[in-house]
Image: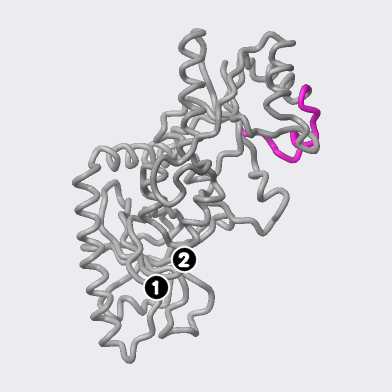
Amino acid sequence: MIAVIGAFDGFHAGHRALLEEAEKLARKNKTGWALVTFSPHPDVYFNRNAKLLFSEYEKSAEAKYLRIPEIIVLPFEQVCHMHPEGFLEMLRKEYSISGIVVGEDFRFGRDALGDSSSIRKICFDKELIYSIIEVVKYSEGPEIGNKISTCILREWFKDGKADVLRNALKFPCPISGIVVHGEKRGTRLGFPTVNILTSIEKMLPAEGVYAVSVLVNNEWRAGALFVGVPPMFRDAGEARVEVHIKDFSGDLYGARVTVFLEEFLRPPLKFNNESELVRDIKLCVEKAVLVFNSNRSLSNGLYHELMNAYNSLDNGDNKTS
């Protein structure tokens, strides 16, 4: 089996180049292939306060979307102390790995001593297939010519650059979580919201209002998402993630809901009264519907595949080791 190895906080174009190479090598050598990754993510292991672009659930769903056939999750606390040669030998023996695919900047093993040169030498000595993929650079956008990296994607996410991030990932970035009870202020104002409790490792985007696509009850709906503490209700406490789902009514408490960031609409604003707030909410919802309809019309196949991936994961079809 061919193994493509990495931490993978989501799968950007550079990661996808690795996946395509693994699939190609597997087909050429008439074998299977798998993703080898780590839990917790190395960034979280070395810094408990670190936040990730994708939660474990979202990363698993994205793997389904990209049709990764198998995921091998290794305990990072154990493998990070292994010698590079011992790490690859463990993969070969325990998982019948016959080939390795990594990026040229991949580091691994105790004190990060292993690198692409180590991969070449060890694989040559052990007669393993290997492929080292050059870094992929942005061909357009604000980072043109620079290496495609998770760090840049995280910065865009934290800055609220939803449309730029969407173009880089080739799909809208998800925020997934469990629906919990709120103060029902939205209901009183005529725009009920679904309050989403995200996983502890998930970073949140810049505060403000976003146009989102919402996957709920096996269908897509337009939504207006607010992230942060409402300026008019500073007593609300911690930052929240709440979405008004257009033309939806029903009880979702305890269910998992995923929203996909399509476009940043505005930063948090403080209004003179609730009437002004209601007018603004109505305007934001109308804009969100326009964005939703436009993106769906341009990429209907994309949303169909995303729905299948998330539904497959929720139905328990998740092959991991």
Q: Which residues are magenta?
A: 73-85
CB atoms of marks 2 and 1 within 8 Å:
yes
Q: In the picture shown, does residue 188 fall above or below 218?
A: below
Residue at the (80%, 35%) spot, across then down:
110
Judge whether residue 76 is colored magenta: yes
Say which quadrant the C terminus sits in: top right
Q: Position of residue 147 (x, y in %)?
A: 53, 41
Q: How is the image coloured?
A: one colour
- For the residue pair 144 and 20, the one nearer the viewer reads as 144
Q: Residue furthest bottom?
A: 272
Q: Position of residue 122 (x, y in %)?
A: 73, 17
SS label for mark 1? loop
Judge whether residue 231 is colored magenta: no
Name which residue type carries label 2: Ala
Q: How many marks?
A: 2
Dot 1, crowdedness within 10 Å: few (<14), some or many (≥20)?
some
- For the residue pair 199 and 111, the one nearer the viewer reads as 111
SS label for mark 2? loop
Q: In the picture shown, does residue 47 fall above or below 75?
A: below
Q: Residue 267, labelled with which disc?
A: 1
Say which quadrant the N terminus sits in: top right
